Image: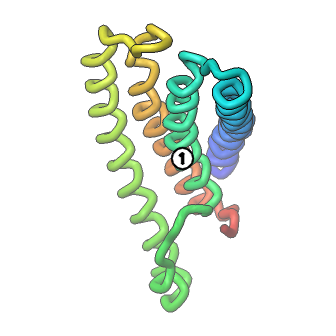
Amino acid sequence: MRDALRVVVRGVDGVNWLVGWLLAALLLLMSVLISWQVLARYIFGNSLTFSEEVSRFSMVWMTMLGAAYAYRYGSLIAVDLLTMLTSPIISRLLRLSVAAASCIFAYVLLTQGWAITERVASQTAPSTRVSMGWLYGAMPAGAALILLNAIAIIADDLSGERKQP
């Protein structure tokens, strides 16, 4: 059982490794586009038509994926007073309860985000003319990653190899 839980955790950590590189690439893209936009507008007197929109799309994707990435490693803001003051057994039950509630939240966000994405898929963005489904797709993608990471947190705790945040 523990070996199976470790395989799950390693798989999710591999996905998070890829997401970390994707987040870095999105940040680089956004930084380059915004810098180029400022340079083009104030030095050359002619701004780019698509850079602001692509940067906004990148920021939305970074927010959703970054929140899920940070959740896995305990980097989000948390109130952990109860887990610090209680016994190890109660503390473990609290952590598992929070992770289970996160699974439920992520599932609702995933299903509702997918429904919204399908509804707006026929609309196009004004500058780039790409489907708005690409923008709204960040919500179910982030929710799926939150769900995976919550499962990994539960598996870490059950296998006895919980990472300390």
Residue 51: x and y in percent read 59, 23
Residue 31: x and y in percent read 70, 36
Kind of residue at badge 1: Ala
Q: How is the image coloured?
A: rainbow
Q: Is residue 11 visible?
A: no
Q: Tell me what residue is drawn at x 54 percent, y 86 percent.
A: 84
Label count reads 1
The part of the image, by quadrant, that contains residue 20 is: top right
Q: Tell me what residue is drawn at x 33 percent, y 49 percent.
A: 104
The part of the image, by quadrant, that contains residue 42 is: top right
Query: Foreground: 21 or 14?
Result: 21
Query: Foreground: 139 or 127?
Result: 127
Mark 1, other Cα within 10 Å: few <14 / some 14–19 / many ≥20 = many
Residue 122: x and y in percent read 30, 8
User: Is 118 positioned to the left or the right of 26 in the image?
Assistant: left
User: Is 75 positioned to the left or the right of 138 in the image?
Assistant: right
Query: Foreground: 57 or 95?
Result: 57
Q: Which residue is mark 1?
A: 68
Q: Is residue 108 visible?
A: yes
Query: Foreground: 47 or 68?
Result: 47
Q: 91 above or below 161?
A: below
Q: Tell me what residue is drawn at x 67 percent, y 40 percent.
A: 16
User: Is 103 positioned to the left or the right of 67 in the image?
Assistant: left
Residue 83: x and y in percent read 50, 81
Query: For the C terminus, which image quadrant?
Result: bottom right
Badge 1 marks a residue whose secondary structure is helix
Q: 162 above or below 30?
A: below
Q: Tell me what residue is drawn at x 60 percent, y 18 percent.
A: 48
